[in-house]
Image: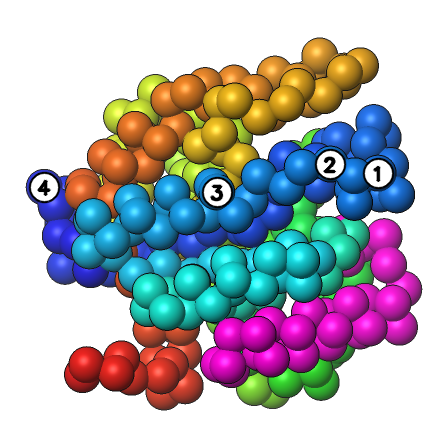
Amino acid sequence: MSAGPFASGVRNAMTIDVEDYFQVSAFAPYIPRADWERLHCRAPQNVARILDLLDEAGVKATFFTLGWIAERHPQLVRDIVARGHELASHGYGHERASDMSPTAFSDDVRRAKALLEDLGGVPVLGYRAPSFSIGVGNLWAFDVLAEAGYRYSSSVYPIQHDHYGMPDAPRWAHPVRDGLIEVPVTTCRMGGRNLPSSGGGYFRLLPYGVSRWLIDKVNREERQSAVFYFHPWEIDPDQPRVRGVDAKSRFRHYLNLSRTEGRIRRLLSDFSWARMDELFTPDLAPRPAHA
């Protein structure tokens, strides 16, 4: 846990969505799923770099890990666990929950959970849907997650967005099914709207000081823990450029990749951070071996 100049006594959750550049939803029209196997997977080297950054800052985080990545790079999973971080699920095949039937979704999240638990040797309590794809049209997904044995989800983004979002959803952790809570990624309420303040493309688009101010505002004024997220490909400015991508997707994906690692380093030192399970399911979180 770090405690930097913006420490307010509130601990925040640092989360990483472990997927590769060719698996992002915006690139789905340009990179067929059948091509994934022939593309060089850069996630292992990027996750290794993130683990070093976290060690340097003394921060423990939660890694929502894609089953497809874990199956092909099991050492990545073992390294996450060995370094004291929480292993959580990002599903298996990076398909939007909103595009799947209940049966297909159940197969996906159960397959990912079993695979991660087998490789990591730890319980997997948390799940995050690709592209925050649980919304008003597929709330049945919470039933599936509860039945599959997950204890928390972080799959709802309470904003208006062209690809996802449920702007009227509760902004803070809340029960959604018996034994299952939803922990939305963080927004800041201003001018009658929820503003994104938890990472992703906004973190790269806006000056660092904006993100820092928004998180500090949530901590100090609302006394709530922020849930921040980023992807391993966001610290990888040397990743291959995908040809033919539309201008909006190209802008969103490649903007300021060369600056992200430095911004993450500052963020880690400016605030206090912890794992999702420690903050939101403390009765279920394993105690560190050295405790």
**Cβ atoms at labels 4 and 3 below 8 Å apart:** no
Amino acid type for the residue under numbered disc 4: Pro
Quick one: which residue is furthest to the left in this view?
A: 5
Mark carried by residue 39: 2
Q: Does residue 135 belong to the magenta stretch?
A: no
Question: Relative to residue 70, is residue 223 drawn left or right?
Answer: left
Mark-to-mark CA distance, 2 and 1: 7 Å
CB contact under 8 Å: marks 2 and 4: no
Q: Residue 274, percent across and down?
A: 29, 62
Residue under the image location 36 percent in, 83 percent down: 286
Q: Foreground residue, 178 or 4?
A: 4
Mark 3 secondary-structure assignment: helix
- Which callout, 1 or 4, points at the residue further toward the start of the chain? 4
- Indicate left or right for 96 with 186 as reference: right
Select label 4 or label 3 by which is in front: 3
Q: What residue appears at the point 58 percent right and 64 percent down from the top-left corner? A: 74
Q: Mark 3 points at which residue?
A: 45
Q: Badge 4, how many Cα within 10 Å: few under 14, some, many 20+?
A: few
Q: Residue 135 versus residue 104: which sits nearer the camera?
A: 104
Residue 107 falls inside the magenta stretch: yes
Q: Measuring 57% from the left and 26% from the top, which residue is drawn there? A: 239
Q: Residue 35 carries which label?
A: 1
The segment highlighted magenta reads 96-123
Residue labelled with disc 4? 5
Tell me the quadrant of the picture where the C terminus can be found. Answer: bottom left
Asked if residue 129 shows in the view, the reply is no
In the picture, which quadrant includes the N terminus? bottom left
Residue type at mark 3: give it: Gln
